[in-house]
Amino acid sequence: MEAIDRDAVQAELSRRTGTHLYLHLETSTGAYAGLQDKKMPTVAAFVRNVPVCYERGTLTGNGPYRVGLKLPDGWVYAEGLTDWQCDDQDRLLLAGHDDAGALLVGLQLSFMPFHS
């Protein structure tokens, strides 16, 4: 993965607008991230292979970034994104890592379901 390039990521989000995609979204302060403050409870969320077709995908911020996907009846967003890539399967992979490289948030979009 490389540091987010605002124009490139926005172009990829725009290219996928109105298409049927599969969403993977996760966030964690537990398994992947080593919390410095052990008094903080572990917080995690994980969804995989959720079908989405968004009306608008927007990248905002100056780093770390936020991506919002406007769905017909609501929103999906991920905040704290730092890195990205499009892989050889044309999946858009976005991630937020802490200073030590631990994964804090991931948002991925694919034309095909993700493997379990």
Image (cartoon, grey):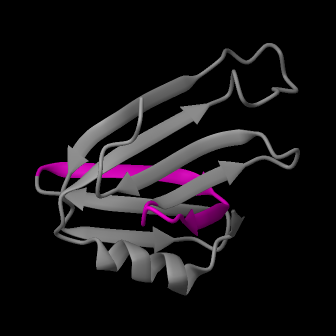
* Quadrant placement of the N terminus: bottom right
The spot of residue 15 in percent (x, y) is 31, 79
Q: Which residue lies at the image location 88% right of the left edge and 27% below the top edge?
A: 36
Name above or below for residue 8 compared with residue 26: below
Q: Considering depth in this image, is 54 or 80 the residue closer to the camera?
A: 54
Residue situated furthest bottom in the rendering: 7
* Quadrant placement of the C terminus: top left
Name above or below for residue 105 compared with residue 70: above
**In screen coordinates, is 67 left or right of 71?**
right
The spot of residue 25 in percent (x, y) is 44, 41
Q: Which residue lies at the image location 78% right of the left edge and 46% below the top edge?
A: 98
Q: Which residue lies at the image location 45% right of the left edge and 29% below the top edge?
A: 46
The spot of residue 64 in percent (x, y) is 66, 62
Name above or below for residue 44 compared with residue 92: above
**In screen coordinates, is 79 left or right of 109?**
right
Q: Considering depth in this image, is 106 or 62 the residue closer to the camera?
A: 106
Tell whether position 50 is magenta. Answer: no
**Magenta range:** 73-91
Q: Which residue lies at the image location 61% right of the left edge and 57% below the top edge?
A: 81
Count every numbered label the image shows and give the total: 0
Q: Considering depth in this image, is 90 or 36 the residue closer to the camera?
A: 90
Residue situated furthest left in the rendering: 72
Q: Quadrant of residue 54?
A: bottom left
Tell whether position 78 is magenta. Answer: yes
**In screen coordinates, is 28 left or right of 48?**
right
